[in-house]
Image (spheres, grey):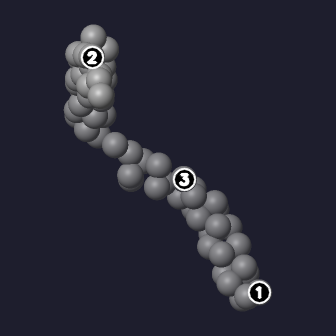
Amino acid sequence: MNWLIGYLAMDVRTKWNKGTLFSHRDRYRADTRTKAVCSLASTALVAASLVVVIALVPAQPVRA
């Protein structure tokens, strides 16, 4: 287990010295178009859920 800790510490130090420790943030950043589509889909989901809730409120339950 000690070898793994040493390896990971050395890897972090090497990336820090090269200035690439946080390069994954740029590499895996979501595209602006993807963010826009996700926001639009979320808005549509909220609107549809609101319509369903409003439609269900006046409904009368079945009486036995």
Which quadrant, please, contains the C terminus?
A: top left
Residue 50 is at least partly visible in this image: no
Q: Residues within 10 Å of mark 3 (few under 14, many from 20)?
A: few
Where does label 2 land, which residue?
Answer: 60
User: In the figure, residue 10 lies in which quadrant?
Assistant: bottom right
Q: Amino acid at mark 2?
A: Gln
Q: Earlier in the sequence, mark 3 or mark 2?
A: 3
Identity, as a three-letter code, of the amino acid under mark 3? Phe
Structural distance between the alpha carbons of marks 3 and 2: 57 Å
Res 2 label: 1
Give the residue displayed 63% in from the left and 60% down from the top.
16
Q: Nearer the viewer, residue 13 or 42?
A: 42
Q: Which residue is mark 3?
A: 22
- Residue at the (53%, 58%) spot, across then down: 20
Q: Position of residue 24 (x, y in %)?
A: 46, 55
Residue 32's place in the image compared with 48, above or below, is below
The secondary element bearing badge 3 is classed as loop
Which numbered disc, 2 or 1, marks the residue that appears first in the sequence?
1
Q: In the rendered picture of this protein, how many numbered marks are placed on residues?
A: 3
Q: Amino acid at mark 1?
A: Asn
Q: Secondary structure at mark 2?
A: loop
Q: Nearer the viewer, residue 63 or 26?
A: 63
Q: CA distance from mark 1 to mark 3?
A: 25 Å
Residue 7 image position (x, y, % from top left): 66, 81
